[in-house]
Amino acid sequence: MYIMYILSYLTKIILLSSIGITIASIIEETNLISKIKKITKPICLISNLPEECVVSLLGNFINPTVGKSMLAGFYKENKVNEKEVIITTIISPLPTILGESVFRVQLPLAVVILGYKLGIIYVFLNILSGFLQALIGILYANIFFERKQIKIGNNSDEKIVFNREVIIKGFKKSLKILKKVIPMIVIFTFLINFLIKLGLMDVVKGLFSPIFRILDLPGEAIAVLVANLAHFSAGYATVDILIKNGVLNEKQALIILLIGNIIGVTMIYLKHSIGTYVSLFGRFGLKLAVINYMVSVMVKILLILLVILIF
């Protein structure tokens, strides 16, 4: 049964990653990027990032793997440097949150399970975390990067090409990338699930028990973190049960949901993101993953403090 769960998870992740990378590879072959560049100038001016970085950010609206794959291509072609890649990946959760996570999945589930008020507040906090993370990246780029002259030409002669040959070229290009990505995903997924079997949750409980006491959270709230490891919707359902049984109030619910978010992000990085970054960017990918994870957790801790102060 447990093996079936892991295989089901891997099937889903590999399928989504494969679709994302294949879409990115086909888009590169269609000349669509040259057309998209025309609308990137205002974003380039605000972010002080080159147009290639902004194009990859727009790719995140489709799928985060699309954006990462595009950025990796530009990096390997020496069109963007390491610092620009780091800042782009720090900003990238915002389009992912707005384009995929929140409105398609998270918002409906949060409102249905947590109720209108709590669900809306929690989703707003998630969107706010994306904006704060993007703001950190944009401020850094504007303060520390040399102001760039934006040169985006109007290549009106370039036409979007979409035919059988383009699809085949894009598919072949994606296969080269997927040969590196998929093994990394499989290795990390089995490794982390093996560690969970060895008692990773006991470590989580040990780490968070003192934090729960400081934040005045009941011990039963640990159940939310355990449920969140399975799926964030399971975390929502557990919070709803604890609220209805008088164990949690709304403030405590928001805090534990945000802590659960940190756990969720940690598991995503361990199972999936680190492997993807390393397979796309090589050794530099590990540095990318660590920096992005640290910034993400820092922003979520700030939101927890915000909830404590306001509510």
Image (cartoon, rainbow, N blue to C red):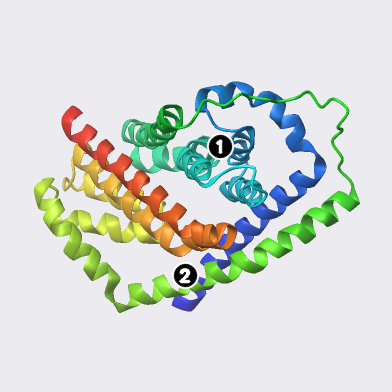
Q: Is residue 200 above or below residue 169?
A: below
N-terminal-most mark, 2 or 1: 1
Asked whether, in this view, residue 110 is left or right of residue 167, the answer is left
Reading the image, the residue beneath label 2 is 188
- Residue 140: x and y, percent? 41, 33
From the viewer's perspective, tell me whether residue 41 is left or right of residue 85. right
The residue indicated by pointer 1 is 99
When asked about the image quadrant of residue 112, the answer is top left
Q: Is residue 91 above or below residue 180?
A: above
The answer to whether one can see residue 128 in this image is yes
Residue type highlighted by circle 1: Gly
Q: Secondary structure at mark 2?
A: helix
Q: Position of residue 122 (x, y in %)?
A: 34, 36
Residue 68 in the image: above or below residue 112: below
Q: Foreground: 129 or 133?
A: 133
Q: Residue at x 39, y 77 (%)?
A: 194
- Dot 2 alpha-carbon crowd within 10 angstroms: few under 14, some 14 to 19, many 20 or more: some
Q: On the rendered structure, is 215 left or right of 125?
A: left
At horizontal 23% and vertical 49% (from top left) the residue drawn is 242
**Residue placed most toward the observer, 31 or 73:** 73
> What percent of the width, then of the height, locates residue 230?
39, 61
Which residue is pictured at 32% across the width and 40% down the height? Answer: 299
Contact (Cβ within 8 Å) of mark 2 with mark 1? no
